[in-house]
Amino acid sequence: MGERFLKVYNPDEVVENLLDKFTTPTTIEEVPIEYAYGLYVAEDIYAKINVPPFRKSLVDGYAVRSSDVKGASSSNPSMLKIIGTVRIGDYPDEIFVKEGMTAYVPTGGVVPDGADAVVMCEETERHGDALFVFKGIAPSSNILDEGSEIKRDSLVLHKGERISERNIGLLNSVGIEIVRVLSPLKIGFFSTGNEITFAHPLPRGKIFDFNRITLRYLIEKDGFIATDYGIVRDEEDKITYTLRKALNENDIVLTTGGTSKGTSDFTVGIINALGKPGVLVHGLNVSPGKPTIFGVIDNKLVVGLSGNPQAVFMIYSTVIRKLLQRKLGVMIGAHAVFGKLLKQVNSRKGRVELVGGKLLTLNNENFIEPLLADSSSVSCIKDTDGYFKIPEDVEGLYEGDVVEFYLW
Amino acid sequence: MGERFLKVYNPDEVVENLLDKFTTPTTIEEVPIEYAYGLYVAEDIYAKINVPPFRKSLVDGYAVRSSDVKGASSSNPSMLKIIGTVRIGDYPDEIFVKEGMTAYVPTGGVVPDGADAVVMCEETERHGDALFVFKGIAPSSNILDEGSEIKRDSLVLHKGERISERNIGLLNSVGIEIVRVLSPLKIGFFSTGNEITFAHPLPRGKIFDFNRITLRYLIEKDGFIATDYGIVRDEEDKITYTLRKALNENDIVLTTGGTSKGTSDFTVGIINALGKPGVLVHGLNVSPGKPTIFGVIDNKLVVGLSGNPQAVFMIYSTVIRKLLQRKLGVMIGAHAVFGKLLKQVNSRKGRVELVGGKLLTLNNENFIEPLLADSSSVSCIKDTDGYFKIPEDVEGLYEGDVVEFYLW
């Protein structure tokens, strides 16, 4: 049996080259803000109102004309006539502060027209309708102007940003009721392989599946809709049937298993048989994940991931996520931090090594502990916080080398 | 009107002191693994099976006795009799590799009994039932032993760890069908204030709510059940009714608004009236969030957050999360990284300053850009990646100072 070598591609080039080879839906949905969490906004979003929406008092006090209390002091207080009380949540249409007059206004209340400053209660004394003010005050004091935090029509969220716990309150505060978001991408996936099972107890010769349940939550975490098509036996008609069904029902399909050059590897042939242009890339110069397949069938992307659990996690988290992020114009966003390697990592020249690691902090410095594992291990991702790359032209990294570490 | 000062407490001390003052349910649920994502495991979890569960071949090749091919070379090949083919997913009970015999085994297949190594196809030549092996091989070569990745009964997840996309595949792989998890904490919350509304268009004198929708997603992101009791007018009987209902239906209740020393501040009185011991802490030496209230009613924790959006976000993300993490013994976990401040930040001695910031990386170094904002702003959290603390005994930090930055 002769070895057939894979032609391997650099993952960054694969992302660039594939971008215009497939399509994703560009439909937009109008979603009430309370159901929009985790979705990606389809357009720039502008404030519908000023924040604050009125001149807001920053203190409990009295709204005055600053000219009325000019030069006031404890020995020479200004006396004003109290003409009303502003209640929080009410707009004081009935109150207009004319010369010599004042009105009570609580913290957060609307400063009534006519007044240009609010004197704190502590600097006043009230006797019936008369208010004595013991201190002068500059115009605008203790007032937050309408729109001073956010101006109506100013940009609050960029197209492609994701709605999160950090900005959903802001959207609500600026008057957004309905938000236009990208329809979530539908990603179908299945595992292939006669050895994989979900039967308990485990039949002899079988293994439990790592990949489907992992892919489900990786996909959902990114805000996409994950649909699981189960475990498919390594038989051409069964895989063909499932792949066709998944393509009909989804925008993108991921398969795991059946990508290496063994005897049960139908994936390439099946993708080529199902539609044009078929397989575009078979093999990445990356470890883990070398035998990854990228194909396009009738404008839909199909990715054949190897059955190796670590490769599934890494290739989804790096290549596929980046490809989708670029294609959709969204910010899925992971943090990168620089840290010093706690130990040496070897690598093979000519391939990009993706290495999981743990982020540790000590004495004002950030450290990365590489967590190496046999590439078939199901446990090696568990204790990682993220990963770093060793470029293809580097043979390894030394203890103390600084790496850019991408948090999951 | 005289000013009443708040007695203020250090937030870390508050966490320590409150820990034994309230209770949270300790009920455990048995959940199928496919519904367990995001939950916290209630006990250490051990592997139910060995991984791999059998001696697994790492290559496409022939299972042999290494002693049979000792000294084999291309000029002097060993000849073996092929007695069978292992199919992937099948257990080869019918194949036993005796002296002089061999069987085909694919990558991932079960190495049949009798054999102690697998020779790669590339080093053999097949003629009918005869196999010529051109190279000797050491015992155990190309075989992954049963249990060599994970031993049955070994610890795979610690009590209190959260089930995530990084470990759910592992749990499935080691044979976990049902996982014992902590019942998710139920947290009810509401906003108080006559000025807050959800009516569109915005009535004059009102503002839209930031806090409820933000709390919902902060709580849900931590894996708890969030129940929204809406906006409650600043009236004692309405707040009392809602707080009592929320306490009946939840394990913990959060309120926002009505915590400062103004005229509409019923919260302290209401908490004290509803049950013992009532308010335990009113005031943290922290900014934002100084007027936070911690109370306990019939063993349930009530936190009165100020209405300030930034304070709600910060106090939940720091003090409340830490308190719950300690109380439940779970790892909600955020990453901390060290970074250099890109600009000076002033602080007031005697209080802990919580400062939102952006993490930036450049030239192998991590930088933190502090994002300061008026404490009432609804937009200041949006562009932050996390926060850092300025301790109470420090008056400010300089550009270039290294801070420990906690990612959200």
Image (tube, coloured by chain):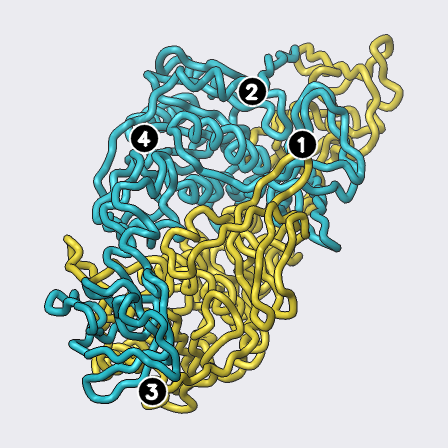
Chain colours: A cyan, B yellow
Which amino acid type is shown beneath numbered disc 2?
Thr
Q: How far is disc 4 from disc 1 in space, using C-alphas?
A: 35 Å
Q: Residue furthest right?
A: B71
Mark 2, residue position: A263
Q: Nearer the viewer, residue A105 or A264?
A: A105
Secondary structure category for the residue under label 1:
strand
Image depth: mark 3 or mark 1 in front: 3
Query: Of the numbered discs in the image, which one, if any, rests on residue B57?
Result: 1
Which amino acid type is shown beneath numbered disc 1?
Ser
Determine crowd level at label 4: few under 14, some 14-19, many 20+ residues with C-alpha closer than 10 A. Answer: some
Q: Pointer 3 indicates a residue of which chain?
A: B
**Vertical arrangement, residue B169 with respect to residue A100, above or below:** above
Image depth: mark 2 or mark 4 in front: 4
The x, y position of residue A160, in whole percent, is 37, 35
Residue under the point 67% across and 16% down: B129
Determine crowd level at label 1: few under 14, some 14-19, many 20+ residues with C-alpha closer than 10 A. Answer: many
